[in-house]
Amino acid sequence: MRIAFFTETFLPATDGVVTRLRHTVEQLVEMGDEVIIFAPALGGPDTYAGAEIYRVPGVRFPHYPQIRLSPPHPGVARALKRFRPDVVHAANPVVLGLGGVYLARRNKLPLVCSYHTNVATYARYYKLGLMVNFARNATRFVHNQAQVNLCTSKVTMDYLLKEGIKRVRLWPQGVDARRFCPDHASAEMREKLSGGYPDQKVLVYVGRLAPEKHIEKLKEVFAVPGCRLAIVGDGPARNKLEWAFSGTPTVFTGVLKGEALAQAYASGDVFLFPSTTETLGMAMIEALASGLPVVAARSGASHEVVDDDETGLLYEPGSGGDLAAAVGRLVEDESVRREMGAKARRAAEERSWENATRVLRGYYERARTLA
């Protein structure tokens, strides 16, 4: 099968959408498929795992410099025609992805769209409130052009159906349980994450540093004695967060990749996830695979990843006391923490990118029959 991806973000970006697309492309190529990726020009590679990356120039999004808005140009249409895809997959179609939707419809190609980000909700966090209704209506219109719409959690599926989006299916999540594994624990990394206090309990957050992630609420964990906080990642809120956490036992590592990221997960004691805006939460699954119990804000997506009181603990998002109590329970009772960590690892091992991609290929075949 020949698959053309249109995505608003790809390497060198490191968010959850990029992680999912990377592993999906790897699996598709391994299964014998041919892939081309239309992505913004951000200085990344021109190929990935044997797939061509067609880079499209764009401008930086003023509220989020790490994102490029890359409107398609005639060269995109020519490249797509040369590739002769069997199916077009538009991931989070907003700007470049809209070109993929348009070209698929114009050329009568099977179209699959996948939903990864609630753009309407994010608009509120970036003071674009006037765009909320427009974003909701535009999302509904664009996705309803597709033969199949994919989402990453049941709670997101329910939301999309209520929003009037049709033909919605669940695209299962995977994780690389070999890369993210307790065996990657490193004394050197723990020293770094703890700011030189490895004997204290190390709480880890991994993800974008952005307003919608509610990272500032993690200050509540310092009500628990003997804790250090490591914040892994980068984003538009980093300067503000560094100021907010000044004077606290917090380390900002910046972006970590590859082995360093695997070590960061495995070298901590507890993973923290304060966001309630996720369509799933890739970082939670990577933490589970690394053997860390997850303390997450109670939301629909976290319910689908964390088995409360088994692989982690869920707390009420607006309650700093509830967050501190959950962290305190794990920090103060090593046997509970270790038992939950072992269960977390076993739960993650049940997920695989190969299985997720086989399900995806089934949706591609379905789109071809409906086109």
Image (tube, helix red, strand yellow):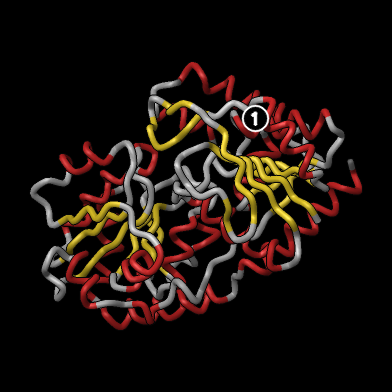
Instruction: Tell me what residue is drawn at x 59 percent, y 75 percent.
Output: 350
- Of all residues, the one furthest to the right in this rendering is 369
Tell me the kind of residue under disc 1.
Answer: Thr
Q: Residue 228 at what x, y percent from top left? A: 18, 62
**Tag 1, which secondary structure?**
helix
Front residue of 58/20: it is 58
Question: For this view, does 74 lie left or right of residue 254?
Answer: right
Where is residue 138, by image quadrant?
A: top right
Q: Where is 112 relative to 57, above or below?
A: below
Question: For this view, does 112 lie left or right of residue 280?
Answer: right
Q: Residue 230 at what x, y percent from top left? A: 24, 59
| Count of labels in the image | 1
Front residue of 150/88: it is 88
Quadrant location of the C terminus in the rendered image: top right
Question: For this view, does 223 lie left or right of residue 311?
Answer: left
Q: Residue 127 at what x, y percent from top left? A: 39, 22
Quadrant location of the N terminus in the rendered image: bottom right
Q: Report whether residue 316 is seen.
A: no
Q: Where is 167 relative to 270, above or below?
A: above
- Of all residues, the one furthest to the left in this rendering is 247
Question: For this view, does 233 lie left or right of residue 367?
Answer: left
Instruction: Tell me what residue is drawn at x 55 percent, y 48 percent.
Output: 46
Q: Where is 40 relative to 131, above or below?
A: below
Where is residue 181, by image quadrant?
A: bottom left
Q: Report whether residue 121 is seen.
A: yes
Instruction: Tell me what residue is drawn at x 22 percent, y 53 percent.
Output: 252
Q: Give the labeled residue for mark 1.
A: 139
Instruction: Tell me what residue is drawn at x 75 percent, y 43 percent.
Output: 88
Q: Residues within 10 Å of mark 1 (few under 14, many from 20)?
A: many
